[in-house]
Amino acid sequence: MTQHVIDSSATLAALLALCGACATPSPPAPAIGATPTEPSAAAAGQHHAGAIDWHPWDEASFATARTEGRMLLVTVVTQWCHWCHVMDTKTWGDPAIAALIADRFVAIRVDADARPDLAERYADWGWPAIALLTPDAQPVTEWKGYQEARRFESELVGYAQDQDAGRTLARKAAVVDTATKPLAAIRDFTRAQLDRFYDPVEGGWGKPQKYPRWAPVAAGLFAGVVHQDTARLAEVTRTLDGELALIDPVDGGMFQYSLQGVWTAPHYEKLAEIQGPAMENLVDGFGATNDVRYLHGARAIARYVRTVLRRDDGAFFANQDADVGTRGDVAPMLGVNWYALPGRAERAARGEPFIDRHVYASHNGRLIAGLARLGQLTADQQAIDDAVTAADVILARHVVGDGFSHDEGHVDDAVLHLADQVAMGHALLTLAEATGQRRFRQLASRTAHFITSTLEDPAGGGYFAHTPVAGDVGVFAERRKPFKGNGEAIAFILKVGRLDEDTALTSSAERALQTFAVEGVVKEEFRAVGEMLLALEGQLVEPLRFSIVGGDGSADDDATRALLRASNAMYVPHRLVDVQIPGAKYPDLGKPALFICTTTFCSPPLTDPATLRDKAQRYLTR
């Protein structure tokens, strides 16, 4: 999805003249490979879906396509997506395209934030993503981002002519080499593949758009600290230095990505699912380097989510739009101009970008984990309290059996998604480490078992993207096992399995690794392999178990809590945190103690929070 930042008053004035242009013919198609000119905020702000008669995502729509022999045209959008608004006005609002679609296609529009399964399926195409499928829902092609009206009309006509001529539309599935190698070799192969996408000048993985990709940063921090790989630690710090430029200096919060191959030309959406992992990366970057700029960045993100995205009950909204006035509520203003205003008062006077007030489990899980991580490493009790409050809301409003529904409004008939289970499982595990409360660890364990019992593929290993969906047909009825989602799930399940000494969980994670840790599979994912690299590291590197023994095993007394805080203040990426009752597994010394153990050694009891870091240091290097 290519975008330009408007910074010229003359250019903006020219674009403002286009307001209301949805009723006029679209301009000629730009040259192949050219970037479309960004329209005014007013044009983008006409929030509708054009003149298209959109069908719902249901059995009847798919049946209509099949019985009438009409191709399916599925567009996946979000409420915050600037270019989705543009396409509503300039393309879907074009009368010729509307007429063509009404005659030859069944058009379905889906919100990516509301449907994590479709968001995962079409994420490579960005938003808006557009998929063309045969009448029986087999893939034909996909389009990435904004499509200019005349060119898009020409392509749709071409596919309609192919169908009339009886030419094959459905594409053949790719053949992947599934030869297996030792996991250590696959880890090195995965790391080398990710390295090829690293930008040595700006940092980050990929260009020209610069995204704050959390998994490569986390994997680099792991390698830098656990393997003492100074080169990869330098890559991470260069990347985090760049990402700091994506943080809004007025309101806080991190923008979605940057343009033009640099970190200083942001596109202005703020997504909840970015804020949480960015907080974790920055906090861990501070822990690994002691660079206080990263801590300030994490706190700026926390300030934003508390003041802008937090609902009255403590849960968090989904996202904030890039531009002002996209719903026609106030005078339109492009984000590049609104975010250039120097202070809160000046911004408030012009209105605020739209906030998507849905509360999704996966988005909240990522924010809970980020806040809990901030509180864990820095002893910020407010961050921990905010994370606990949000977690309790999700636990009260999203639990279905032992799993989590995505949207709190669809609990009874919920399709349960892997993304929600993993995000909330990771959040609960992080809260268990930050607070010492056994309930969070027990809930994390319950979530891990739900994934393995409900979403694991019993035939091939790995985890499906969601529970079965009634009425889905064609390619949508095939249960996908997302690569990135499985990487996160494996790392989470493996960690819980080791904490609980639960071989059913660790065996499930190992089966999934055997399915995905294959060179041919990894190759197909290009730069999106950071999550699987972390899973491989989690399997291959024996963790250090920090067992804190004291009180009633829940860190409720001051002395045990002080030892937990001192332990949490150390950045140890391969650590398991375990709070235990004295005498259950370790001796009762009459006062709280920390034991640092692996399967082959245990430290002597460490009892003084003031000297804990110095005394523990000898056990932290491999």
Image (spheres, grey):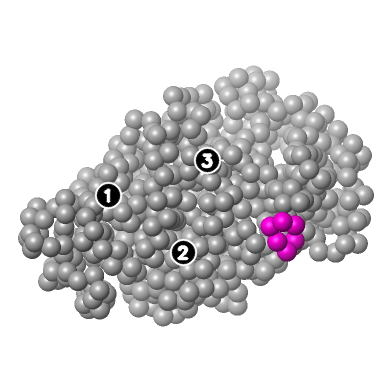
- Quarter of the figure that contains the C terminus: bottom left
Give how far across and how far down residue 553 sits, in percent: 18, 52
| Kind of residue at disc 3 | Asp
Q: Quadrant of residue 141?
A: top right
Check disc 1: other Cα within 10 Å, few if <14, some if 14-19, many if 20+: some
In the shown orientation, is residue 398 left or right of residue 306? Answer: left
Give how far across and how far down residue 223 sits, in percent: 38, 72
Give the mark, 1 or 2, whose residue is nearer the N terminus.
2
| Kind of residue at disc 2 | Asn
- Which residue occupies 53% across, 46% down? 310
Q: Which residues are magenta?
A: 341-346
Instruction: Find disc 2 in the rendering and name its residue.
Output: 281
Say the numbered circle drawn on residue 437.
1
In the shown orientation, is residue 429 left or right of residue 357? Answer: left
Of 590 and 622, nearer the camera is 590
Q: Are marks 3 and 2 in contact (CB under 8 Å)?
A: no
In the shown orientation, is residue 617 left or right of residue 359? Answer: left
Instruction: Find disc 3 in the rendering and name its residue.
Output: 312
Helix, strand or loop at mark 3 = loop
Give the mark, 3 or 2, whose residue is nearer the N terminus.
2
| Mark whose residue sits in front, 3 or 1 | 3
Of 305 and 32, nearer the camera is 305
Q: CA distance from mark 3 to mark 2?
A: 27 Å
Q: Is residue 493 above or below residue 263?
A: above
